[in-house]
Image (cartoon, rainbow, N blue to C red):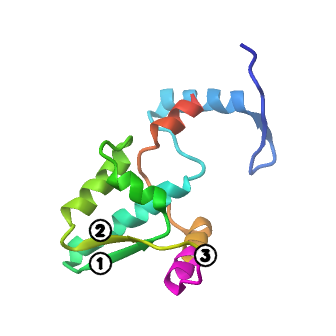
Amino acid sequence: MKARLLLLERENNCRKTRLEERQDAIETLRREGTLRMERIHEEMADLAAIGFAADWALEHNKLVNIHTDSQSSIEAIKSVEPKSEFVNNVKENTHSFRLLVSLTWVKAHASNPGNERADRQAKLATTIGQYLDFPAPYSYVKLKI
C-alpha cells in the first residue's frame, strides 16, 4: 500500500511527514508509555469543562445548571456505552450528582451573553490555559500509530 505523505508545519518551522509523526509517536509510547495530544479536540474540552463543573458542585454542595452549546458532549454523556474512559468518567460524575447538576443545551452564536463569555474564555484558555492530563481517545492513538 502506498503511504500518502502529508507535510505538516511544526512550531519550530521544521517539516515532518505524517509517517515521521507516527514513527515518533510509536517511539514515545515505547519509551515513556504515554502519548501527548498536541491539540485537544473541542468535544474533549467541552466534556472536561462539564466534568469540572460537576466536581465543583459536589465539592461545594451547590446546585449547578450547566449550559452548553455542545450537542455532541450531551449525546456522549447520554450514550448507553461511551467509547472512552474519559467520557465514561464525566458521564458517571454527572449522573452521580444529578441532584446537584443539570445539563441544558443552548444554541451557539445566538447572542446568549453567558455562552458568548464562555466562548471567549475557551479561546483564552487555548493560549494561557493549564495543561490537562486525561487519556487520549482510542481513535487518536490509533491515528498516531
Q: Which of the two residues, 112 or 64, is positioned nearer the viewer here?
A: 112
Residue at 28% x, 67% y: name it: 55
Q: Identify the secondary structure beneath mark 1.
A: strand
**Residue type, numbered disc 1:** Val
Q: Callout 2 environment at 10 Å: few (<14), some (14 to 19), or many (20+)?
A: many
User: Which secondary structure lies at badge 3?
Assistant: loop
At a point 53% along the width and 86% down the height, the residue shown is: 113
Query: Considering only vertical position in the picture, is 24 above or below 39?
Result: above
Q: Give the mark nearer the N terminus: 2 vs 1.
A: 2
Q: Are marks 2 and 3 in contact (CB under 8 Å)?
A: no
Residue 85 included in the magenta stretch of the image: no
Q: Which residue bears the numbered disc 3?
A: 109
Earlier sequence position, callout 3 versus callout 1: 1
The range drawn in magenta is 110-120
- Residue 40's place in the image compared with 17, above or below, is below
Residue, disc 2: 54
- In this image, 88 relative to 61: left or right? right
Badge 1 is on which residue? 64
Please name the residue shown 50% across and 39% down the image: 35
